[in-house]
Image (cartoon, rainbow, N blue to C red):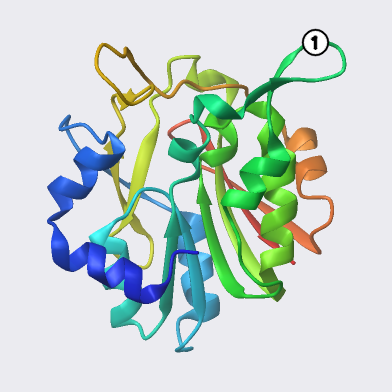
Amino acid sequence: MASVAHNVIKFLRGSSSSAGQASGVGTAKRLTRRSSGMAELSRTFGAQEGICVLDLGSTSPGNIRYFTEHGHKSYSEDLLLASLDPTLVTKDDEGNRVLDEKRFLAENLVYPNAHFDVVFCWNLPDYMDESLVKPVVARLWSALKPGGILLAFFHTRDAGADAPCYRYHILGNDLLEMHPILTIPEARGPGRTRTSFRLQRVFNNRHIENLFRDFASIKFFLARDNVREVLVVK
């Protein structure tokens, strides 16, 4: 489990550039975007302190600082990177390649039930191996408190198959900075190749509603950059 203290230690040990290198965040031009979902989430929790936040991405000193300055507890996990473990690869009953979801969930997202007020899922479902997406969403539902909120981003078909994968860093109540994740190590060891996160699928609205069917409510925001922001409440 990634604890608040663990995140603070990471922050003190290295700069944002070193954290980016560890997770494969490139040095390409950084972009900013307005987020309607983030704005609504900020209005909901803006006056509260001490909420528990899960940030699903590589360690972001900026996000940790943003959460702690607002009096919140911050946890983070890089599930995309964890999903690349080659030892997770197995086959289903029909011989199709899948990842071992039971082992993945035994090693990741290990939190008590009803632990978090907010989960920033970002664009995880679009880039994670399809066999893990539903199990991960189910685990996040369990980890959220009743009334807890999850924010996720989904590409539209117009984004194209080569839509880059971004790490999102919170700059303000509705402003995000986007760092392209250019390359990541496919596996450790000499002579190993490198690969990039690629868009695995495009969810339409019906697929998204089905993915979050156990949640109490869902709200869509269509952005100009071919991204649908989705805010779901448990």
Residue at screen point 48% across, 29% down: 84
* Residue 207 can be seen in this image: yes
Q: In this view, does 145 lie above or below 98?
A: below
Mark 1: which amino acid?
Gly
Along the horizontal axis of the image, is 196 left or right of 131? left
The residue lying at 75 percent from left, 52 percent from top is 138
Frontmost residue, 82 versus 137:
82
Would you say 41 lies left or right of 197 here?
right
Q: Residue 34 placed where, x, y %?
A: 37, 51
Mark 1, secondary structure of its residue? loop
Q: Residue 157, how many percent across, how many down? A: 59, 20
x then y, percent, for residue 31: 24, 40
Q: In which quarter of the image is residue 156?
A: top right
Query: In this figure, what is the number of numbered marks?
Result: 1
Q: Mark 1 points at which residue?
A: 95
Can you say whether 20 is above or below 138 in the image? above
Identify the residue at image location x=56%, y=69%: 118
In the figure, 45 relative to 190: above or below? below
- Residue shown at 59%/73% (left/top)? 116
**Label 1 neighbour load within 10 Å: few <14, some 14-19, many 20+:** few
